[in-house]
Image (tube, helix red, strand yellow):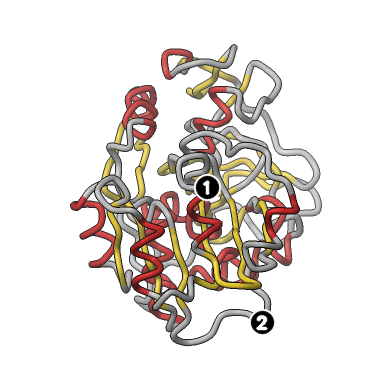
C-alpha cells in the first residue's frame, strides 16, 4: 500500500483526500517510480475545479522526481535504480509511488537534485516550448521585446532567466512590487505591476510605441484585451493558461485591424507527444539548468498531507517561483 491524493468530485481544495492505494507492476511501455519530491502547478487547480474535466475518482499531480523501481516490457531508456523526473499525463504525481507511462519520464542528471527535478519539469518544459517553439513570424532575435505575464511565477521566473540568456528584452508583469522585484532580479529587462500601472500604456512607452513581437499569457481574462493591443503588427498572442478565468470568445475579424496578428492556444502536452520530442526538450532544459543559465527557485514547500493548503495558497496568488510537495 502507498498513499496518494485523489478527488471524487470537482470542487475546492477540501475535495483533496489522502488515501491508501495499491500499486501494481508496470505493463508494456510503463515504469513504476517511487517519488522523492512532487511539483505543484496551476493545471492541478484547473483539473480539481473542473475547468479541465476528467473522469472520477481522479488522482492529481503532473510532475515529480524519484527512483525507478520497475520497468515494463519495451522500455529501453530507463532501468531500475535510475534517478528520473517527469511532467506527464495522465495525472497522478500526488503520491508516494505510482505506475505510469514511461514515454515522458526522463533520466535525471546527477547534477540536478530530486527537489529541483520535481519543481522544474512542467514549468521548465513550458518555458522551453514557449521561448523556443512558440514564436512570431520570422522568429525572435537579440534585442526583441516580449511580454510575459505572471513573470514571478514558476514558469515566469524560468522564462525571465532563459529569455535574458537568449538576448531578448522580456517585459514582465506581476501583481505586486515585491513580485516585480523578483522578476527583475531574475533577468526581466522591464517589470510592470499591473495592479498599480496600466500595462498597455507602459508597454507602449518601453517599446517606443511599436509593441512587442509576442505576448505569453497564462493569466487569461484579466489581461486578455490589453494584451492584444500590446502586439506589434504580425506579432503573436500565445495563450497558455487561464489563471484569472477563460477570456471571452474572440471573433477572428478583430485580429486584422490590430495588425494582422496571430493567435495560438498552447499546451505542453502537444509538444511532448513523442519520446523523442520529450527528450530533446528535456535535454535543452537540463543544459540550461546545469550550465547556470537558469536557476530553479523553490520558494514554498508543503508536506503531502497539506496539499489542500498548497492549493489555497496557489489560487490566492500567495506563491512565487516553484512550489514543492515533500514526502
**Is residue 232 placed above or below 149 in the rendered structure?**
below
Residue 196's disc is: none
**Is residue 67 placed above or below 246 in the rendered structure?**
below
The residue lying at 36 percent from left, 49 percent from top is 322
The percent position of residue 196, horizontal first and vertical second, equals 24, 48
Q: CA distance from mark 2 to mark 1?
A: 24 Å
Q: Earlier in the sequence, mark 2 or mark 1?
A: 2
In front here: 126 or 284?
A: 126
In front here: 257 or 4?
A: 257
Residues at circles 2 and 1 in contact by the CB criterion of under 8 Å: no
**Is residue 103 placed above or below 110 in the rendered structure?**
above
The percent position of residue 134, horizontal first and vertical second, equals 63, 66
**In the displayed image of the protein, which residue is found farthest to the bottom?**
142
Figure quadrant of the C terminus: top left
The residue lying at 67 percent from left, 28 percent from top is 24
In front here: 1 or 50?
A: 50
Label 1 residue SS: helix
**In the displayed image of the protein, which residue is found farthest to the front?**
257
Estimate how packed mark 1 is, as few (under 14), some (14 to 19) or many (20 or more) residues with alpha carbons within 10 Å: some
Asked whether, in this view, residue 300 is left or right of residue 230, the answer is left
> Where, by quadrant of the figure, is residue 155 drawn?
bottom left
Q: Which tag is nearer the camera, tag 2 or tag 1?
A: 1
The percent position of residue 40, horizontal first and vertical second, equals 43, 40
Residue matched to label 2: 138
Estimate how packed mark 2 is, as few (under 14), some (14 to 19) or many (20 or more) residues with alpha carbons within 10 Å: few
The residue lying at 39 percent from left, 51 percent from top is 150
Residue matched to label 1: 224
The percent position of residue 170, horizontal first and vertical second, equals 40, 71
Amino acid at each position: 500500500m502507498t498513499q496518494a491524493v485523489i478527488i471524487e468530485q470537482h470542487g475546492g481544495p477540501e475535495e483533496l483526500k489522502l488515501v491508501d492505494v495499491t500499486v501494481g507492476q508496470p505493463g508494456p511501455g510503463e515504469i513504476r517510480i517511487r517519488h522523492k519530491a512532487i511539483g505543484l502547478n496551476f493545471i492541478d487547480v484547473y483539473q480539481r475545479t473542473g475547468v479541465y474535466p476528467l473522469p472520477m475518482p481522479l488522482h492529481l499531480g503532473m510532475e515529480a522526481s524519484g527512483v525507478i523501481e520497475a520497468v515494463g516490457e519495451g522500455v529501453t531508456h530507463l532501468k531500475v535504480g535510475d534517478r528520473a523526473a517527469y511532467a506527464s499525463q495522465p495525472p497522478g504525481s500526488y503520491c508516494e509511488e505510482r505506475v505510469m507511462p514511461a514515454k515522458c519520464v526522463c533520466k535525471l542528471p546527477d547534477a540536478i537534485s530530486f527537489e529541483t527535478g520535481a519543481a522544474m519539469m512542467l514549468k521548465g518544459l513550458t518555458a522551453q516550448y514557449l521561448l523556443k517553439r512558440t514564436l512570431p513570424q520570422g522568429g525572435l532575435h537579440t534585442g526583441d521585446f516580449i511580454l510575459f505575464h505572471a513573470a514571478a511565477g514558476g514558469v515566469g521566473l524560468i522564462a525571465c532567466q532563459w529569455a535574458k540568456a537568449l538576448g531578448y528584452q522580456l517585459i514582465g508583469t506581476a501583481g505586486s512590487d515585491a513580485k516585480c522585484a523578483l522578476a527583475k532580479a531574475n533577468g526581466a529587462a522591464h517589470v510592470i505591476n499591473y495592479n498599480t500601472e496600466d500595462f498597455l500604456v507602459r508597454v507602449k512607452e518601453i517599446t517606443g510605441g511599436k509593441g512587442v513581437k509576442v505576448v505569453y499569457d497564462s493569466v487569461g481574462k484579466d489581461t486578455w484585451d490589453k494584451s492584444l493591443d500590446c502586439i506589434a503588427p504580425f506579432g503573436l498572442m500565445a495563450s497558455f493558461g487561464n489563471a484569472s478565468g477563460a477570456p471571452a470568445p474572440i471573433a477572428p475579424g478583430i485580429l486584422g485591424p490590430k495588425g494582422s496578428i496571430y493567435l495560438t492556444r498552447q499546451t505542453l502536452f502537444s509538444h511532448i507527444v513523442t519520446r523523442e520530442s520529450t527528450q530533446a526538450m528535456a535535454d535543452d532544459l537540463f543544459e540550461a539548468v546545469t550550465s547556470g543559465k537558469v536557476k530553479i527557485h523553490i520558494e514554498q514547500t508543503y508536506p503531502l498531507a497539506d496539499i489542500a493548503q498548497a492549493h489555497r495558497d496557489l489560487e490566492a496568488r500567495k506563491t512565487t517561483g516553484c512550489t514543492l510537495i515533500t514526502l
